[in-house]
């Protein structure tokens, strides 16, 4: 992503969105530290902290839907995830504020994990393989960040493969379609891609306000029922009865 800024001599070009914002700085730092620890000192932590639906449901490793986001399989894996987080997350954090950005990031990442766990119950070999497979990486949360960027800056050009400029909205559609098709591919091909799709879906639902407030809805219905019952008990009517012109609203 290139940005164009005015200067004393006209215009100059700068790669990326600028300096790291507070949340991005912390997230990248945690990912780098976790990568160094698991790669060089305690490799077994990957099995403990990575997302494995079988461990979550049978061993009650309830931390895995969060901790898996901070683990990566190699240099290229963490490099591209952190690069994307910086390039697309910095501007969102500046616009939203640090608190909301962090909340959204974890909603997308945990939502991606929840999607993976839910799909692991699909009958057949795909569900079984997903149930016992290990998923690591910040890709689910990063895909959610990409989606948010496309929703807020739909026509901002993104250079696909560093060559082809594509509006952000179409870029997200393309990577979403690639993830969908890959998740429907052969055995093992869709493990990570289901997490990518989950991050896109969770981010979209959160930003569009499609969160279910079941308890609030129940409370609203109950209060409405009590008000209606009280009106009947005290002979209160919202508009008077047609056969009693002297009755008024109390």
Image: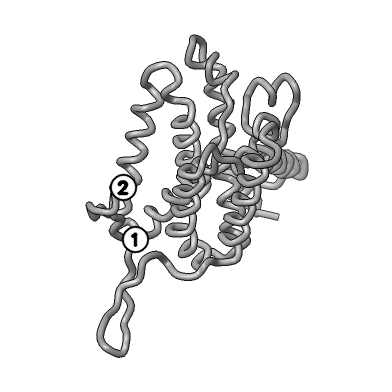
- At 48% from the left edge and 59% from the top edge, which residue is drawn? 86
- At 46% from the left edge and 44% from the top edge, which residue is drawn? 76
- At 60% from the left edge and 51% from the top edge, which residue is drawn? 32
Using the image, determine if residue 155 lies above or below residue 171.
below
Query: Which quarter shows the C terminus?
Result: bottom right
Q: Position of residue 102 (x, y in %)?
A: 60, 55
Q: Which element type, helix, strand or loop, lies under badge 1?
A: loop
Apparent side of residue 199 relative to residue 163 in the rendered image (left or right): right
**Which mark, by number, is residue 1?**
1
Number of marks drawn: 2
- At 57% from the left edge and 55% from the top edge, which residue is drawn? 28
The numbered mark, 2 or 1, whose residue comes first in the sequence reads 1
Q: Which element type, helix, strand or loop, lies under badge 2?
A: helix
Q: Quadrant of residue 152?
A: bottom left
Q: Nearer the viewer, residue 185 or 31?
A: 31
Name the colour scheme.
Answer: one colour
Judged from this view, the residue extending furthest toward the bottom is 8
Apparent side of residue 215 relative to residue 127 in the rendered image (left or right): right
Query: Which quarter shows the N terminus?
Result: bottom left
Pointer 2: what residue?
A: 171
Q: Nearer the viewer, residue 219 or 197?
A: 197
Q: Quadrant of residue 47?
A: top right
Can residue 103 be seen here? Answer: yes
Q: Position of residue 207 (x, y in %)?
A: 49, 50
Q: Position of residue 153 (x, y in %)?
A: 36, 60
């Amino acid at each position: 992503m290139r940005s164009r800024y005015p200067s004393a001599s006209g215009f100059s070009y700068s790669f990326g969105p600028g300096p790291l914002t507070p949340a991005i700085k912390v997230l990248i730092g945690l990912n780098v530290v976790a990568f160094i620890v698991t790669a060089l000192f305690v490799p077994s932590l990957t099995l403990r902290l990575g997302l494995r639906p079988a461990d979550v449901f049978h061993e009650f490793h309830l931390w895995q839907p969060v901790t898996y986001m901070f683990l990566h399989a190699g240099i290229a894996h963490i490099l591209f995830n952190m690069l994307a987080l910086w390039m697309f997350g910095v501007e969102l954090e500046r616009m939203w504020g640090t608190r909301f950005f962090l909340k959204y990031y974890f909603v997308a990442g945990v939502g991606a994990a929840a999607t993976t766990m839910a799909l692991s119950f699909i009958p057949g070999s795909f569900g079984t393989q997903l149930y016992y497979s290990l998923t690591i990486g910040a890709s689910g949360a990063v895909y959610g960040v990409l989606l948010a960027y496309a929703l807020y800056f739909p026509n901002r050009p993104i250079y696909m493969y560093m060559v082809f400029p594509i509006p952000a909205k179409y870029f997200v559609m393309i990577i979403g379609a690639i993830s969908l098709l890959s998740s429907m591919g052969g055995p093992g091909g869709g493990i990570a891609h289901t997490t990518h799709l989950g991050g896109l879906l969770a981010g979209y639902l959160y930003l569009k306000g499609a969160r279910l407030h079941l308890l609030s809805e129940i409370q609203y219905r109950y209060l409405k029922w009590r008000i209606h019952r009280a009106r009947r008990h005290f002979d209160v009517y919202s508009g008077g009865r047609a056969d009693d012109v002297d009755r008024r609203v109390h």
